[in-house]
């Protein structure tokens, strides 16, 4: 199946609003947990990098003028991923909250003779964490939700368009302190979202599909 293309959406005010909401949700969650006993709070900031083992966009279907049409799954490329975290645990407790921003580019591969498409994803999310509060080694796990901003660039078959939708993730990791304030960590994350591009094609139609990926991350955190 070949879809014609048209001028897509730019990164508009509607796109910026969910980003602000994501940051606000993360800040309010951390502030709420930290209202009392702030002197004994454990707060941390972290940077992280890793690999996105993306598989496919599956269940591809048309939207708007292309509604009712189906297309083969889109293969995605593995890519680098990087981001930042802000976390809070009350005192030396088992449970905490973490805000994060992650960015990756799992580009859509060629489909037979149809050229590939540059795809970028930025996730702004909040995770609820449970850990073993060891002084040196801390295994942890969590669940999270967030806003996924996906953007496809101009290509031979598309004009730029942006998708803003909710996403989720499951995660597990291990943190090790190398000083009382500095720790290294490794983390596995399984994440998903539905990406919907409403107007990248000439006839005014678009497409949507389910995104699933596995992230393997390493990072450095500072605790204060």
Image (spheres, grey):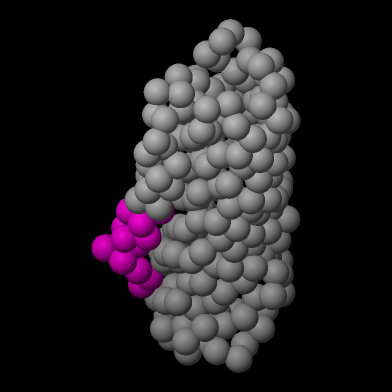
Asked if 224 appears above or below 95 in the picture, the reply is: above
Question: Which image quadrant: the C terminus?
Answer: top left
Magenta part of the chain: 7-22
Q: State the residue lying farthest toward the front.
A: 37
Residue 182 falls inside the magenta stretch = no
Q: Foreground: 20 or 179?
A: 179
Q: Is residue 59 left or right of residue 220?
A: right
- 145 to 95, vertically: above or below: below
Identify the residue at the far top of this view: 179
Residue shown at 31% from the left, 66% from the top: 14
Residue depicted at 45% across the width and 42% down the height: 33
User: In this image, 92 relative to 16: left or right?
Assistant: right
Answer with left or right where residue 129 lies relative to residue 14: right
Q: Main secondary structure of the magenta part?
A: helix
Residue 11 can be seen in this image? no
Q: Residue at x 46, y 50 (%)?
A: 124
Residue 14 horizontal side relative to residue 127, left or right: left
Task: Kindly identify the residue that appears in the image at 40 percent across and 23 percent down.
Answer: 39
Q: Quadrant of the N terminus?
A: bottom right
- Observer-nearest of 170 and 150: 170
Residue 70 image offset from top left, x and y in percent: 66, 83
Residue 174 x, y percent position in the rendering:
71, 28
The picture places residue 30, in percent across and down from the top left corner, at 43, 41
| 207, above or below 170, in the image | below
Say above or below: 215 vs 212. above
Q: Which residue occupies the foreground of this view, 42 or 56?
A: 42
Q: Position of residue 12 (x, y in %)?
A: 29, 63
């Amino acid at each position: 199946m070949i879809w014609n293309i048209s001028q897509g959406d730019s990164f508009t005010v509607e796109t910026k609003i969910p980003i602000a909401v994501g940051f606000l949700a993360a800040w309010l969650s951390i502030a709420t947990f930290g209202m009392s006993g702030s002197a004994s709070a454990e707060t941390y900031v972290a940077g992280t990098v890793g690999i996105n083992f993306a598989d496919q966009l599956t269940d591809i279907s048309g939207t708007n003028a292309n509604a009712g049409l189906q297309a083969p799954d889109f293969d995605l490329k593995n890519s680098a991923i990087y981001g930042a975290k802000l976390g809070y645990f009350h005192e030396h407790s088992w449970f905490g909250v973490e805000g994060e921003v992650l960015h990756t580019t799992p580009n859509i591969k060629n489909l037979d003779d149809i050229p590939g498409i540059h795809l970028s994803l930025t996730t702004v999310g909040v995770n609820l964490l449970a850990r073993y509060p060891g002084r040196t080694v801390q295994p942890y796990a969590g669940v999270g939700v967030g806003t996924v901003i996906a953007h496809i660039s101009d290509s031979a078959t598309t004009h730029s368009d942006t998708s803003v939708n909710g996403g989720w993730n499951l995660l597990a990791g291990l943190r090790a302190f190398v000083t009382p304030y500095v720790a290294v960590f490794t983390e596995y994350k399984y994440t998903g979202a539905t990406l919907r591009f409403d107007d990248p094609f000439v006839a005014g139609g678009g497409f949507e599909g389910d995104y699933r990926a596995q992230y393997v991350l390493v990072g450095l955190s500072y605790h204060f």
